[in-house]
Amino acid sequence: MAPRFTEAEKGKGTMVTTRDNPIRRIRAPSLDTSALIIENALTLIGKLTNPQEQKIWALIPALPQKWNLLGRAVGSDLGNNCFMFRFEREDDFRRVLDNRPYHFSYWMIILQRWEPVISSSFPSLIPFWIRIKGLPLHFWHEKMVAKIGQDLGTLETHELTKTTARVRVLIGGLKPLIKKAVIEFDSGEESLINLEYEKLESHCSICYSLFHARRNCPEREQLEESSERIPDNRGYVSVQKIALRNATTEFSTQGEMRKEKPSTDLYGFHERFDRYGRPFGERVSTKHTRVPPPLRSSNAIEPSTQTWKQKTTKGDSQPYVSPQYTHKKTEYKRLLSKGKGPVPPKKPRPMETGAIWGRCWEL
């Protein structure tokens, strides 16, 4: 029987190879690049810090709108998460450099003046104004502030007033940020200072990197594992509980077997531990903390001697009594003309047929 051929062998499929894609090495010729260096003197090179959130095709038309340029700036994608902007006017170029740092899509971008270098780590410098917090007041000196800026990176300038101390430093954006530092004094004393970065957008809150968020930090799993490693000093506690639960039974004096209830005195309150392995300590008596109940009065409540009586309405008190009839019609007319005599009641008007049927319908 003839063997069966696979789809790849028949030419109907693509053969999968396990080897890596080949990379060809090309030798560059010797060139005079002096003219190109002069031509790119007004060029900025930028790099994304988070390509998952930032897109170059959206960044290139958006950044010039923030710069408020007087001339034109032509941008293009250079690959490897890098881009470039070529300016027509030098004043626009200088102003954009002085107003750094910039961000796009809530993440920082590294923007640096182009240099004729060949390096995968270019551009890498990003300037920040950094506020110094926690420095003792008697060390608010020009030399002290400048020394802090020089240790953080390339010091551009510094500002020292009665209320603020800050430095403008070019730091390596490819490395994690430094947010705390310890100042060592000649007396052997130390002081912890905090560094606050102005115009700083999203970054990792674990390692302080500009290139990923906290959820993507490689140190996150290690941090969570170390936080879960809490010393468990309650191992012997569970053993004692099991021993008490499985206590042996004893025979009573009548010869009957009964199960003895485990005593809580074997495991006192001061020997217990909380969920973090810390002892509870001595029990606080509730006798001094709880609110005492109200005292009962010695005088007994006497029964009420009042009796209940139904309230009478106004109509039940006295019936209506009409005035006496008099035969002296002349006297009645005289009093009626003066407004002193009784007014005879008005005769009711006869109800219409519709009203009568309405009343019947309501009933």
Image (tube, helix red, strand yellow):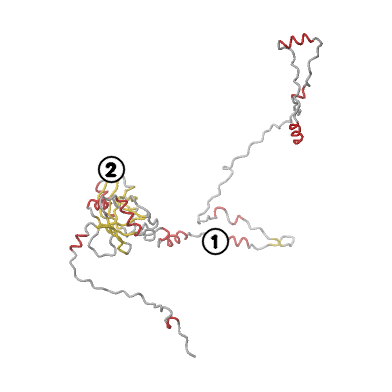
For the residue pair 69 and 127, the one nearer the viewer reads as 69
Instruction: Check if mark 1's residue and mark 2's residue have beta carbons within 8 Å.
Output: no
Residue 147 is situated, as x and y percent measured from the top left of the image, at 26, 51
Identify the residue under disc 1.
236
Q: For numbered disc 1, what is the local secondary structure? A: helix
Instruction: Identify whether 168 is placed above or below 15.
Output: above
Residue farthest to the front, as pictured: 353
Q: Residue at x 20, y 60 (%)?
A: 39
Q: Residue at x 47, y 88 (%)?
A: 3
Nearer the camera: disc 1 or disc 2 = 2
Where residue 138 sits, quadrant-wise, is top left
For the residue pair 91 and 293, the one nearer the viewer reads as 91
Residue 55 is situated, as x and y percent measured from the top left of the image, at 36, 59
For the residue pair 30 and 19, the one nearer the viewer reads as 30
Looking at the rendered structure, the kind of residue marked 1 is Tyr
Looking at the rendered structure, the kind of residue marked 2 is Thr
Residue 244 is situated, as x and y percent measured from the top left of the image, at 61, 60
Instruction: Identify whether 88 is placed above or below 306.
Output: below
Q: Indicate left or right for 62 with 337 as reference.
A: left
The tag on residue 8 is none
Which circle's residue, 1 or 2, is located before the other in the chain? 2
Q: How many marks?
A: 2
Identify the residue under disc 2.
161
Residue 228 is situated, as x and y percent measured from the top left of the image, at 47, 60
Q: Is residue 195 visible?
A: no
Q: CA distance from mark 1 to mark 2?
A: 61 Å
For the residue pair 331 and 302, the one nearer the viewer reads as 331
Q: Indicate left or right for 201 with 142 as reference.
A: right
Q: Badge 1 local density, few (<14 within 10 Å), some, or many (20+)?
A: few
Q: For numbered disc 2, what is the local secondary structure? A: loop
* Image quarter (top left, top right, bottom left or bottom right) of the C terminus: top right
Q: Residue at x 63, y 37 (%)?
A: 294
